[in-house]
Amino acid sequence: MHAKAKRWDGVVKIRKLMRERNIKKEPGVSWIEIRNHTHVFVSDDNKHPEISQIYEKVRELLAEIKPLGYVPNISSVLHDVEEEQKEDYLSYHSEKLAIAYALMKTPSEAPVHVIKNLRICDDCHSAVKLISKATNRVIVVRDVNRFHCFRDGYCSCADYW
């Protein structure tokens, strides 16, 4: 709430209070299953054995969707950092990493299924719509609220989630 309103002093106070009370924020996690093996991703992941190839695939996908109208929604970044750093934060959200990996490892006609423990952010929702169009793939993201079925640049939620 404070971060979205850019009240960084409020953010600092709340985070300090959370530390004092030993309250931990649940990290955003996305996972996919490929050939009976579950792959788990967190934002800015660096633990996956193929992470450098996954990051490269994400960069390729983002470059591919920019001509289709993708503009990073930096208002989704709730950190007090420089504008260019906000775009980097958005680029490697867990669902983008999971989708990139699935696109690398599954047949071109296979749908992609991603499960998330939190709500998909505005930026990822916009990006995945365009990734579905650019790759001609059906991408299903199950977030904490609902299933999103992305196909041909559209989402089954009709952008209401």
Image (spheres, rainbow, N blue to C red):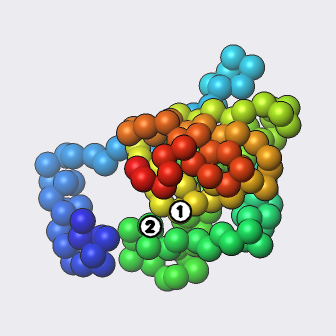
Say whether marks 1 and 2 touch (CB < 8 Å): yes
Q: Please give the name of the residue rendered at 21% of the width and 54% of the height, measured from the top-left corner.
A: 19
Where is residue 107 shown, x and y percent of the image?
A: 85, 32
Q: Which residue is mark 2?
A: 76
Q: Which residue is mark 1?
A: 123
Left or right of 120, for residue 1: left
Q: Is residue 94 above or below residue 9?
A: above
Give the residue at the far top of this rendering: 36
Mark 1 belongs to which amino acid? Asp
- Most foreground residue, 70 or 90: 70
Q: How many discs mark residues in the rendered view? A: 2
Instruction: Determine the CA span between mark 1 and mark 2.
Output: 7 Å
Where is residue 6 shown, x and y percent of the image?
A: 30, 78
Secondary structure type for disc 1: helix
- Most foreground residue, 47 or 131: 131
Q: Quadrant of residue 134?
A: bottom right
Query: Counting other residues with Cα less than 10 Å from the Cα at mark 1, is it few (<14), some (14-19), or many (20 or more)?
Result: some
Q: Please give the name of the residue rendered at 76% of the width and 42% of the height, measured from the top-left corner.
A: 137
Left or right of 128, for residue 64: right
Query: Counting other residues with Cα less than 10 Å from the Cα at mark 2, is it few (<14), some (14-19), or many (20 or more)?
Result: some
Quick check: can you spot residue 29?
no
Mark 2 belongs to which amino acid? Ser
Q: Is residue 92 above or below residue 45?
A: below
Where is residue 104 shown, x and y percent of the image?
A: 81, 41
Q: Please give the name of the residue rendered at 44% of the width and 73% of the height, measured from the top-left corner.
A: 75
Q: Please give the name of the residue rendered at 71% of the width and 50% of the height, measured from the top-left corner.
A: 152
Quick check: can you spot residue 28?
yes
Who comes first in sequence, dot 1 or dot 2? 2
Secondary structure type for disc 2: helix
